[in-house]
């Protein structure tokens, strides 16, 4: 069941984020609406898909050829700028798109680095070298109070409730007053 679900996620992800086996930032690349952080997303996707091949090795046969073709397309379009080596975002076009920046460069570098996944150590677990003890309570702990922190009292809760009611009442009153339309003569 786990393998079937992983296969479905990978099939959907490759179809969506790697049409024609080349990474595309679907939320902004097609309409030239990318914000600063979005230029790095293709690099993240490359790294995550490469890591999947270590966590679920049965996926490598499908993922690695796509990553290789995408990385080749990424490098091939790095022909811009004064030095002729700057990279853009639109890898599938096969040519430099005239827009460069650190995000585009980072994404291409990540795409190339993802091809080295076969030589990289897999992610560690608690049993294979990880140092995090983990918390099966999801960070909730055992309910004890942290050192130097006083417990919340009934008075604290009552005070917080009163302040919340006053703020909400004031906001509702203000919004009501602002939307009140006085009838003129």
Image (cartoon, grey):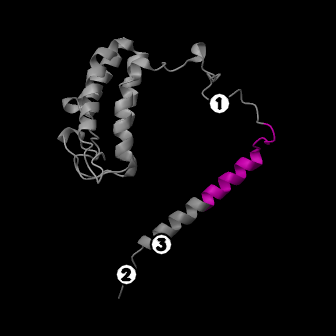
Q: Nearer the viewer, mark 1 or mark 3?
A: 1
Q: Is residue 147 left or right of residue 138?
A: right
Q: Residue at x 29, y 54 (%)?
A: 82
Secondary element under disc 3, as helix, strand or loop, is helix
Q: From which residue to which does the magenta span run?
A: 147-166
Q: Is residue 165 left or right of residue 22?
A: right
Work out whether mark 2 precedes mark 3 in sequence or the reverse, and give the earlier one.
3
Question: Whole-percent x and y of residue 54?
Answer: 42, 17
Determine which residue is flagged by label 3: 177
**CA neighbours of label 1 inside 10 A, class few (<14), some (14 to 19), many (20+):** few
Work out whether mark 1 precedes mark 3 in sequence or the reverse, and give the earlier one.
1
Work out whether mark 2 precedes mark 1 in sequence or the reverse, and give the earlier one.
1
Question: Whole-percent x and y of residue 26?
Answer: 27, 41
Main SS of the magenta segment? Answer: helix
- Residue 152, by quadrant, is top right
Secondary element under disc 1, as helix, strand or loop, is loop
Q: Is residue 177 left or right of residue 39?
A: right
- Does the magenta segment cover residue 179? no
Q: Nearer the viewer, mark 2 or mark 1?
A: 1
Q: For the C terminus, which image quadrant? A: bottom left
Determine which residue is flagged by label 1: 140
Q: Residue at x 78, y 41 (%)?
A: 151
Determine which residue is flagged by label 2: 183
How many marks the image carries: the answer is 3
Kindly check if marks 1 and 3 are in contact, taking CB atoms under 8 A apart as contact: no
Placement of 163 over or under 153, stated as above or below:
below
Q: For the N terminus, which image quadrant? A: top left
Q: CA distance from mark 2 to mark 3?
A: 14 Å
Q: Residue at x 29, y 27 (%)?
A: 67
- Residue 95, by quadrant, is top left
Question: Whole-percent x and y of residue 36?
Answer: 38, 51
Q: Residue at x 38, y 18 (%)?
A: 53
């Amino acid at each position: 069941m786990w393998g079937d679900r992983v296969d479905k996620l990978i099939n959907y992800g490759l179809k969506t984020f790697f049409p024609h086996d080349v990474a595309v930032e679907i939320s902004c690349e097609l309409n030239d609406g990318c914000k600063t952080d979005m230029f790095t997303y293709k690099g993240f996707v490359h790294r995550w898909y490469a890591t999947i091949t270590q966590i679920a090795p049965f996926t490598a046969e499908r993922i690695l050829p796509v990553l290789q073709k995408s990385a080749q397309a990424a490098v091939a379009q790095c022909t811009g700028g004064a030095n002729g080596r700057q990279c853009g975002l639109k890898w599938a076009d096969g040519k430099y798109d005239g827009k460069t920046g650190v995000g585009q460069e980072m994404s291409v570098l990540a795409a190339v680095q993802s091809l080295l996944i076969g030589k990289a150590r897999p992610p560690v677990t608690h049993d294979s070298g990880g140092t995090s003890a983990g918390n099966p309570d999801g960070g909730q702990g055992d309910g004890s109070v942290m050192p130097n922190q006083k417990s919340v009292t009934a008075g604290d809760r009552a005070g917080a409730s009163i302040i919340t009611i006053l703020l909400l009442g004031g906001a509702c009153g203000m919004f009501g007053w602002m939307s009140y339309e006085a009838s003129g003569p």
